[in-house]
Amino acid sequence: MAGWRWYHRAIPRPAGRSIPSRRATLDDPSPSPPPPGSTPPHRPPPGLRAQLLAIRDAAVALVGAHIDLAKTELSEIAGRIGRVVALAALAISVVLLAGLLGVLGVALFLGEWLLGSLGWGVLHGILALSGIAVAAGSLALGVAAGRLARSLLGGVIAAVVIGVMLGLEWPNQLFSVVGEAARLNVSEGERPLVVGLLVGALIGVLVGIAAAIRIESGGGRLAAIVGMAIVGAAICAFSAITFGPQVGAGVGITIGYLSWIALMGVDVVSGGIDVDGLKERFYPSQTIETGKETVEWLQKRMPPGIGS
């Protein structure tokens, strides 16, 4: 035994290393694990305020999550809608451009081929587009399509009648015959023009007198008679010119377009605009009436004293 103790003391221990002891230390601060089979200590439940705060935080987090999801989805939907709108706008623009080129192309082709000049095509293209614009505006204001069709038919009739008359020089021939019958002391070349001025002024005076009957002031009556006489003389003198088939047709088509636009304007002014119809088209009456019925239904089923 003495040798063993000497050997134990003679062997140096490593620095920083201790020999663990098998004896438990009573003042060890680390808690010892609970023995198997034992129940953990009972903790008191949270109070009402803590529970309400926890519920509030959970509700806020849930609502925030839904809002973030909705924002993400709405942003994706907005991007898709923007793409669809952009493509639709491009398609509409291309269609409008194609229609514009079609109208101008047909007008220019007819002007060059039928009337002998591109100038007629440019003029008729401008008038055609103007008529389409007036028709579209009238439709937007609620004018019936049948009324616009009647205006278009009137323009077509005016174009055909005036084009044929001027192209075949019927007014010139008529005024020549009238001048010969009246034995006017005017050269043969100027006779249709002079007769046209006289006949037109006479017709204008008659129309002015018919219009002056409805005018109360004396100055207005005189102005109506003189104005209609000047207009009638100018129209008949213009019709007495020898245009030829191509120019006569061009003038007839021009007057037809102008008559179409004028008839649409007169129809809108005389027929008026249905303001109530426009209001009904853009007023959500069905939604408002349904909302009122729902409110009345809820008020009938509320207990007395609530919602009154």
Image (tube, rainbow, N blue to C red):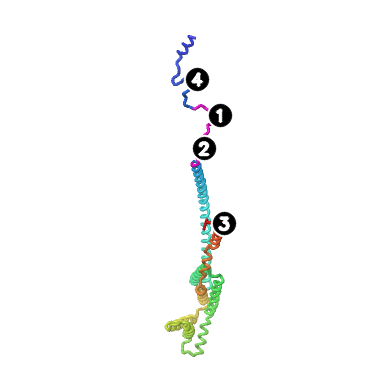
Q: Give how far apart the Cα atoms at labels 3 and 2 are.
A: 42 Å
Q: Secondary structure at mark 3?
A: helix
Q: Amino acid at mark 4?
A: Arg
Would you say the magenta stretch is mainly helix, strand or loop?
loop
- Quarter assignment of residue 302: bottom right
Q: Position of residue 191 (x, y in %)?
A: 48, 86
Q: Position of residue 119 (x, y in %)?
A: 48, 71
Q: Amino acid at mark 2?
A: Pro
Q: Where does label 4 land, which residue? A: 23
Q: Position of residue 274 (x, y in %)?
A: 52, 70
Q: Where does label 2 land, which residue? A: 45
Q: In the image, which is nearer the foreground, mark 3 or mark 4?
A: 3
Q: Where does label 3 land, which residue? A: 301
Say which mark, if any, is on residue 38: 1
Q: In the image, which is nearer the foreground, mark 3 or mark 1?
A: 3
Q: Amino acid at mark 3?
A: Arg
